[in-house]
Image: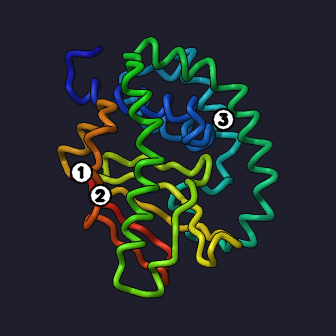
Amino acid sequence: MSADPKVEKARLEVVATARFMLAGTLSFIEGARRIIGRQREADLDDRDVDIVPFVAIASETDAYPFGETRLLWKPESLARLQPEIDRAEQWAREVGAAHCRNLIERLGPASEGALLAEAEFWPRLARCITAELRASRDQTMRFLWLDDFVPNTLWPAPEQGKVLVWAFVSEDDGKSFVEYRVCLHLGPAAVERYRKGDWSGLLSQPDAAGRCTIDRASRTIDVICR
């Protein structure tokens, strides 16, 4: 690791991004964009053999919507484009997977414990949000439940104090599912936990009761992580 705190922080974010990509939580297309966005801060050269492939991925797929850009698209337009995005995503994974592993090894591999904590975090968050829905005094909210998170929709933005991801929410007792945007709002301590891979500390103990705000009209869920 570099002695420069800013470089070290950027490298931790590159490592976290690479881990998300390999785990299937974060799209390789969005991940490539994020890695090259942190490249200079992480003191990684443009000609670095583990950076060049992500530059190529980002260049070839720059027209596809990810993260907050999805909010600007109509659902039917996204649905029509999805098969093309899926093909590009498969190509990006084939190009970038080995280089993700290289970056993790070079810049500071996450421990097995950190990887396990991340894998446990998302099901736990889903349970917390569902419990919050069940406890709502609003009768139109109490029958909703969060089934799972949408693959490849994670959009980490710790520099903005947030992490976005989309989730499948049932509004009709499991007959169909609607996509909701879930935003984790990270306080300063939570940002540092996130960068260090301390997933177990992002939610309050024993659950996130009182920290979730659910807006059915806008199909958004906000979670406060201190």
Q: Is residue 25 above or below residue 207?
A: above
User: Quick one: SS at disc 2?
Assistant: loop
Q: Position of residue 136 (x, y in %)?
A: 36, 78
Residue drawn where x is 57% and y is 29% of the image:
22
**Percent coordinates x, y for residue 123 in the rendering:** 47, 47
Disc 2 from disc 1: Cα separation: 5 Å
- Report, in whole angstroms, how far the alpha carbon at label 3 lies from the one at label 1: 37 Å
For marks 3 and 2, the one nearer the N-term is 3
Residue 57: percent from the left, percent from the top? 66, 35
56 lies left or right of 49: right
Q: Are marks 2 and 1 in contact (CB under 8 Å)?
A: yes
- In this rendering, the answer to whether 212 lies above or below 108 is below
Residue holding disc 3: 57
Quadrant where the N terminus is found in the figure: top left
Marks 3 and 2 close (CB-CB < 8 Å): no
Relative to 131, residue 31 above or below: above
